[in-house]
Amino acid sequence: MINCKLENLIKSVHGFTMMELITVIVVIALLAVIIIPGYLHFIGDAKKDAVVAEARTIYLAAQIRATEFKSAETAENPYRIPDANDLRDLVGPDNVYEGVTKLTIVDDNRDGTIDKIEMIKNNINVIIEPGKNVIVDGKVRTVYSRDDQK
């Protein structure tokens, strides 16, 4: 009796056909083709946003230092444009500069107002100018203020 049940069980086992397996593989491949590029684009945008946030932090720190340097200006202590070392205590941990290959702080008129900052970090080029212009890899991104969101 046990042998009979075992034989029936072995004979009644059904598997998937080759066509069913190929269909499942094709469906999974199509889903991967649709989902993966969107996911990679999302990751790229997140990396750019992180670099923009760090560049904004550096811009604000540079503006603070430029204002301090301008207010302390004397004949013996002339105004100078702040550099990365002047900003270390304001921008936080040292890893903010990790991956930065270029950092340019511009004060054209030497009036204590930062006119532009350009930073290249992890091959992402960010240019911040006063107002609403943020340029990331050559493309303008609009930065909205609270008044613009009405």
Image (cartoon, rainbow, N blue to C red):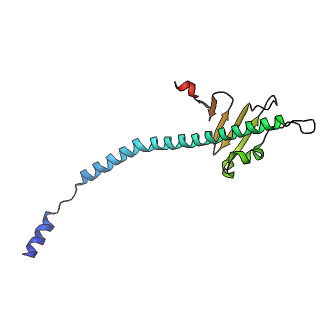
Query: Nearest the camera: 60 or 38?
Result: 60
Residue at 13% x, 63% y is 12
In the figure, 124 relative to 5: above or below?
above
Q: Position of residue 106 (x, y in %)?
A: 76, 34
Q: Position of residue 142 (x, y in %)?
A: 58, 29
Q: Position of residue 55 (x, y in %)?
A: 66, 40
Residue at 71% x, 35% y is 117
In the figure, 102 relative to 2: above or below?
above
Count numbered badges in the picture: 0
Residue at 8% x, 72% y is 4
Query: Nearest the camera: 148 or 55?
Result: 148
Is 62 placed left or right of 124 in the picture?
Answer: right
Q: Quadrant of residue 115?
A: top right
Query: Nearest the camera: 5 or 88?
Result: 88
Farthest residue in the right direction? Answer: 76
Farthest residue in the bottom direction? Answer: 2
Is 11 placed left or right of 113 in the picture?
Answer: left
Q: Quadrant of residue 45?
A: top right
Is 26 placed left or right of 104 in the picture?
Answer: left
Q: Position of residue 51 (x, y in %)?
A: 62, 42
Query: Nearest the camera: 37 or 23?
Result: 37
Quadrant position of the N terminus in the picture: bottom left
Q: Quadrant of residue 118?
A: top right
